[in-house]
Amino acid sequence: MIRTRCVQQLSALKRGSSLGTSMRSQNSGQPTSNLSARTPKRPRKRRANFPVEKLMEQFLEQSAQAEDNFYQVEERRLQAEDRRREMEHARELQMLQMLGQMFSSVSSAAAPSKASPPAARAPVNSSASSSPSCPRGQSGQVKHPSPRRDCFTQQSRLSTSAPQALVFDRYYSLGSTSHRGMDDDLLSLVKNTIPPLTSKKHKGQDGRIGIIGGCQDYTGAPYFAAISALKAGADLSHVFCTKEAAPVIKSYSPELIVHPVLDSPNAVEEIEKWLPRLHSLVVGPGLGREGLLLKTVKEVIEKSKTRDIPIVIDADGLWLVTQQPSVIQGYHKGILTPNIMEFTRLYQALNREPMDSSDHQHSLMQLSVAMGNLTVVLKGEQDVITDGSKVFTCSLEGSGRRCGGQGDLLSGSMGVFAHWAHSASAAGVIRSVNPSVVAAYGACSLTRQCNSQAFQRHGRSTTTSDMIQEIGSAFKKLFES
């Protein structure tokens, strides 16, 4: 009986194991069939692994390219607009000259046949002294030696004068040092180059001036040049200086656009991209004589010459010219503005002989010819200007005050006048005179008038900042009265 019971338990165990095996086989087979019934998955595409930095770099390059394209289109539009305005200005000037000739002919026809005594001149006190200076008395009247006439007393001649080129040729010849009516005729030419102010103009049309200079030791000079350019009539004034000088120059005035790139590794490229937007360049105020900066400035001058824009070189920029005259030699839109010490160094560097201190005008002409008939302005008691063929003297009286920074006022305003003069020449407004000479004379007259007015107010304490405050009224008195 016990044996029968054991046999039954063994049979039950066998049946249970076989049942479990069949169930396991069914369970294991079921997912296999289900997997085989499913649709096979599509292979996943493998994407390129671009880093974020590379994507950002591509985006910035595309943005810069788009910006450059925009500025190129805008520059072409502005140039076309400038040409149109210049043509309108030239037509207006021609009409005024025709009216002046017509009134002159009418007045001469109506005059009696009997010769009448010459009309009395405007009351200008002439000094009996033969000194070339023109001291200003307590009454504020300008005194000139008898061969010369004041820059302001004959402004009424404009309405009845013949075309300026004919008047000009009557008075000036090679090496001449005494020219009757020189101040009046040159000021008339300067006036003809000044663009009229109209509501149709846009920002930047009357002048975008670049100042190359400004280092750790010299931050005032580029500021004086840039702010003088603005106050003389430019619309925008850029300063390209070193990184250390930029915050200081920016703190002087929010009206200046300051670029701290002059000592950067890619300084030439940084400045070159702005050259298409500039009308003229002033090189040297506060530049210093550090070799790397001078090398950068030399390359910038070369790039600027290819764009045919006027270049005024002053201060430490003249030191560069003394070392390497070829950097600006023969460039017809270049202007040098040396004082007597800078002029002496330039003369001796080019002529390899001592300068004749008894005849500065002849030495100045020699220097100009050696530089390829470059316009040179010798600053002094009288500002002497030459382009190698003619000599002109700005004898407008300033004062005995010689504070630092006056040369920066001169160079900054000269950058503006140079743009105006060459634009007027391209439009046919002035033909027989070198536009750079006209620009130099306008800037010299303005600087001297500012000096005179500031000295009347402040006397011995006059500074360049005081002179800059007089630019508006001096400009109006000289060129808009």
Image: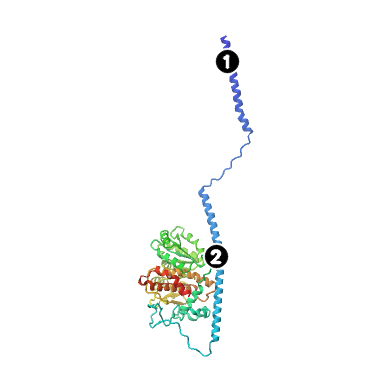
- Dividing the picture into quarters, in which one does residue 412 lie? bottom left
For the residue marked with disc 2, what is the amino acid?
A: Leu
Taking the image as drawn, is residue 376 in sight? no
322 or 56: which is nearer to us? 56
Q: Position of residue 108 (x, y in %)?
A: 54, 85
- Between the C-alphas of marks 2 and 1, the distance is 109 Å
| Residue occupying image coordinates x 53% and y 65% | 202
- How crowded pointer 1 is (Cα within 10 Å; few <14, some 14-19, many 20+) is rated as few
Above or below: residue 446 compared with residue 294: below
- Residue extending farthest to the top is 1
Q: Position of residue 157 (x, y in %)?
A: 50, 80
| Res. 10 mark | 1
Above or below: residue 157 compared with residue 467: below
Q: Earlier in the sequence, mark 2 or mark 1?
A: 1
In which quadrant of the rendered image does the N terminus lie? top right
Please give the residue where the numbered disc 2 appears in the rendered image. 78
Question: Which-is-in-front pick, marks 2 and 1?
Answer: 2
| Res. 154 mark | none
